[in-house]
Amino acid sequence: MSLVLASGSPRRKELLSMICPEFSVITSEVDESAITAPTPAETALALATAKCRAVAKDHPEDVVIGCDTVVDCGGEIFGKPADRDDAVRMLHALSGRAHQVHTGVCVCRGEECKSFVATSTVRFYPIEEETIQAYADTAEPYDKAGGYAIQGTAALFCEGIDGCYYNIMGLPVSRLARLLREFR
């Protein structure tokens, strides 16, 4: 089976290599701002499906994986921060509370498509203002949903996790591996 990841995310590439060492990467040209859904989880799935189908239409013989991750803070979607102020705003909102991380996954080969949403709950300790400001001065928050990397320095903020750790990084590895078995 020829596998295609419809994402340029370095974290997703790293995590997918745990399942399959050989795959290609073809990013989609989907306008993410044009895609909405009633809930954050449904938005993650709609984005993943759009990305997957956009690449799959040009690669009908391949198994294509589309993913999208959103942070859900009280029903508000936190994507990648637009700038430093946005990163600081997100970290303030996440400080001292629980939030959900939803990753939509869509897998297609030709017309056959299967999908799911994985949800993990993350609880953050209260984060001191000085720490928020220092974290926002690093490069880490800016290419990650919610403005933090659980596998990076933000591990210091994490009080606990319910659900798949790898989902928080952007790819629910075990669940995707099980779904890919259906495409052999």
Image (tube, rainbow, N blue to C red):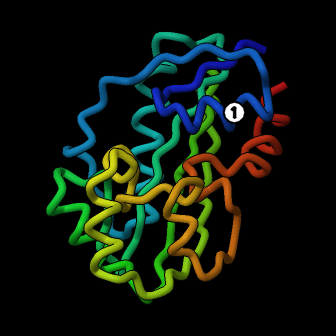
- Give the image location of residue 62, x and y in percent: 65, 14
- Which percent across, then down, holds residue 99? 46, 78
Q: Is residue 180 above or below residue 110?
A: below
Q: Position of residue 47 (x, y in %)?
A: 39, 45
Q: Amino acid at mark 1?
A: Leu
Q: Residue at x 52, y 31 (%)?
A: 10
Report the front residue among 56 and 97.
Answer: 97
**Relative depth, front residue between 153 and 15:** 153
Vertically, is 39 above or below 180? below
Which residue has dot 1 on it?
16
Vertical arrangement, residue 54 with respect to residue 42, above or below: above
- Relative to the observer, which residue lies in front, 22 or 139? 139
Left or right of residue 43: residue 156: right
**Residue that appears at 25% across and 54% down:** 81
Q: Is residue 105 left or right of residue 29?
A: right
**Split into 4 quadrants, where in the image is the C terminus?**
top right
Residue 90 location, quadrant: bottom left
Q: Nearer the viewer, residue 110 or 163?
A: 163
Of helix, strand and loop, which one carries label 1? helix
Asked where in the image residue 1 lies, by quadrant, the reply is top right
Residue 138 image offset from top left, x and y in percent: 33, 50
The residue depicted at 18 percent of the width and 51 percent of the height is 82
- Quadrant in the picture for residue 12: top right
